[in-house]
Image (cartoon, helix red, strand yellow):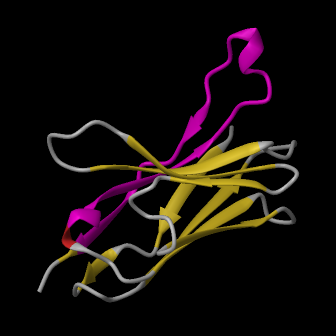
């Protein structure tokens, strides 16, 4: 059974930094596409940053130049380095991995999230 779990969230002051980690277990294959999403209270889930095999990396405009997504293929893990955090970055941050068999109807994988709160 594939599992994803996030860590590294917490309370940080505006302008501060955090590093989120997403670890995986139970997978016998490498994920081609992994990403970080976030969801603030009352808001829709938003794609923050993604990385695809071949080093294709994309960021939401609101976090570009502040956040960096890093992938460790040896561990099937991703990280999110967040700098110059702003109150509007406050959200539950979730790790996502695309199921390589999704074209056969299998669901993608999600972690339960780690909470990031940016406040003075």
Is 103 colored magenta in this rendering? yes
Query: Is 54 on the left-hand or right-hand side of 12?
Result: right
Q: Which residues are magenta?
A: 88-117
Q: Is residue 113 above or below residue 67?
A: above
Report the residue at 43% width, 64% height from top: 63
In the image, residue 24 lies at what x, y percent?
67, 55
Report the residue at 72% width, 43% height from top: 33
In the image, residue 78 lies at what x, y percent?
66, 63
In the image, residue 36 lies at what x, y percent?
52, 53
Report the residue at 64% width, 62% height from top: 23
Q: Quadrant of the C terminus?
A: bottom left
In the image, residue 100 lies at what x, y percent?
79, 29
Report the residue at 71% width, 31% height from top: 99
Residue furthest top as drawn: 104
Total number of numbered labels? 0
Is 99 colored magenta in this rendering? yes
Q: Is residue 16 above or below residue 49?
A: below
Query: Is 67 on the left-hand or right-hand side of 103?
Result: left
Q: Is residue 14 above or below residue 113?
A: below
Q: Quadrant of the N terminus?
A: top right
Occupied quadrant, residue 69? bottom right
Foreground of the two, 40 or 58: 58
């Amino acid at each position: 059974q594939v599992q994803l779990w996030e860590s590294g969230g917490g309370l940080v002051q505006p302008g501060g930094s955090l590093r989120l980690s997403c670890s995986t277990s139970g997978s016998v294959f490498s994920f081609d596409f992994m990403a970080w999403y976030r969801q603030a209270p009352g808001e829709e889930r938003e794609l923050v940053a993604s990385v695809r095999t071949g080093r294709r990396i994309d960021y939401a405009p609101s976090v570009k130049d502040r956040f960096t997504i890093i992938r460790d293929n040896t561990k099937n893990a991703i990280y999110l380095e967040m700098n110059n955090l702003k109150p509007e970055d406050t959200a539950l941050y979730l790790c996502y991995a695309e199921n390589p068999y999704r074209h056969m109807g299998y669901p993608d994988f999600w972690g339960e999230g780690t909470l990031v709160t940016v406040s003075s």
